[in-house]
Image (cartoon, helix red, strand yellow):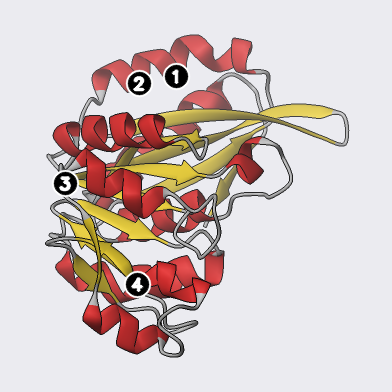
Amino acid sequence: MSHQPSAAMLVIGNEILSGKTRDANVQFIGESLANMGIVLAEARVIRDDHQTIIEAVRDYSHRYDYVFTTGGIGPTHDDITAAAVAAAFATDLEINPAAAELIGGDPDHPRMKMAQIPVGATLIENSVSRAPGFQIENVFVLAGVPSIAQAMFAALSARLQRGQAIVSANADVFMKESDIAVPLTSIASANGDVEIGSYPFSRDGTYGANLVVRGTDADRVDAVMNEVVSAMSALGGEVVRRA
């Protein structure tokens, strides 16, 4: 696979780790980045802990082209993401005049906490509830609520350098992974310019695997997928090519 811009994601929130809230943002951002030719290489779920956020932001910011965080930028006591991200870049929080104007109302209202933005950061528009996210260097700080995170991502997407769009092809093979491992490994070794994944499933008591080929060259993806289908068919398994 040719070089693509890289990204990582931090999902911030005790409610995610406790199981009380189901995350939907990794899937959305991962798919959106793939369509833009940006590889989401890593994602972590971390607690609302000041030092943990600082260390994770610094680590990801150094290792990836783009970093996306979701969660922890609301008005309550446990919304500490903005302060931690500011500390990660050795800067302070300040009431951002543009953010305060967007939020509106009493300057002493708890909602004004969402206007506290790291010095030097650029706002990210929020067309859903107005309180903005922000970008500081290569880190984009988004809300945790999926509808708001999606709106913020749409607003920031023009800032991202795109690579070649990542395309994929997939097929279901109704055999156990252990039965297809050898030929699949051989195909993967011979076609290093694409990524081949095997994802097992059980449907109505029948075992199988969804085989996915990903790459930036649609013709190569299709050719390798044809090779995979032929190899699986030669083993005597039922293979269903998906659109």
First in sequence: mark 3 or mark 4? 3
Q: Quadrant of the N terminus?
A: top left
Q: Secondary structure at mark 2?
A: helix
Viewer-closest of 50 and 126: 50
Question: Which mark, by number, is residue 79?
Answer: none
Which residue occupies 45% across, 87% down? 106
Image position, residue 120 (x, y; %): 12, 62
**Cα–Cα span, label 1 and label 2:** 5 Å
Q: Eyeballing the image, is 157 above or below 181?
A: below
Q: Are marks 1 and 2 in contact (CB under 8 Å)?
A: yes
Q: Nearer the viewer, mark 1 or mark 3?
A: 3
First in sequence: mark 1 or mark 3? 3
Residue 167 in sight here: no
Which residue occupies 81% across, 29% down? 206
Q: What residue would you read off at disc 4?
A: 115
Question: Which mark, by number, is residue 5?
Answer: 3
Residue 90 as seen in the image, left or right of residue 224:
left
Q: What residue would you read off at disc 1?
A: 184
Image position, residue 214 (x, y; %): 35, 42
Q: What residue would you read off at disc 2?
A: 187
First in sequence: mark 2 or mark 4? 4
Q: Nearer the viewer, mark 2 or mark 4?
A: 4
